[in-house]
């Protein structure tokens, strides 16, 4: 599948909106790994597997192996 990332992202902007709502980033600000880690901890505490998967994918985009491929 050529465009697998489009299929992997179910709700675009979900992590950013949650981070803004929780006050982890400013509206329109850059999503950081610190903010994503806080969301991951929250998802683990609540047992929200969907949010956990989305946050882990976002972390890969921001800091992981997929960030290097974008350049």
Image (tube, helix red, strand yellow):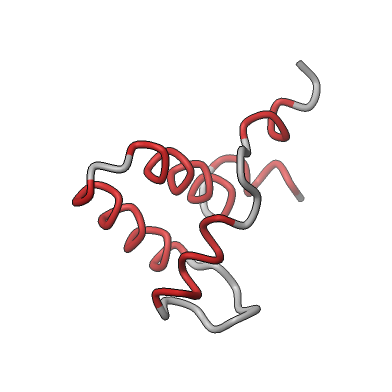
42 left or right, relative to 63: left
The answer to whether residue 17 is above or below residue 22 is: above
What's the residue at 45%, 48% (across, down)? 55
Residue 15 in the image, given as x and y percentages of width and height: 51, 57
From this viewpoint, which residue is outermost toward the left? 45
39 left or right, relative to 21: left
From this viewpoint, which residue is outermost toward the bottom? 26
Q: Nearer the viewer, residue 23 or 63?
A: 23
What's the residue at 34%, 37% (across, down)? 49
The answer to whether residue 30 is above or below residue 6 is: below
Q: Nearer the viewer, residue 65 or 55?
A: 55
Q: Quadrant of the N terminus?
A: top right
Task: Specify the quadrant of the image occupied by residue 24.
Answer: bottom left
The answer to whether residue 20 is above or below residue 12 is: below
From this viewpoint, which residue is outermost toward the top? 1
Residue 67 in the image, given as x and y percentages of width and height: 63, 49
What's the residue at 37%, 43% (across, down)? 52
In this rendering, the count of numbered labels is: 0
């Amino acid at each position: 599948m050529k465009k697998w990332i489009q299929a992997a992202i179910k709700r675009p902007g979900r992590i950013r909106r949650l981070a803004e709502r929780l006050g982890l980033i400013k509206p329109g600000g850059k999503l950081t790994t610190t903010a994503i880690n806080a969301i991951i901890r929250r998802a683990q505490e609540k047992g929200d597997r969907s949010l956990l998967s989305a946050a882990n994918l976002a972390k890969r985009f921001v800091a992981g192996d997929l960030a290097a491929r974008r350049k």
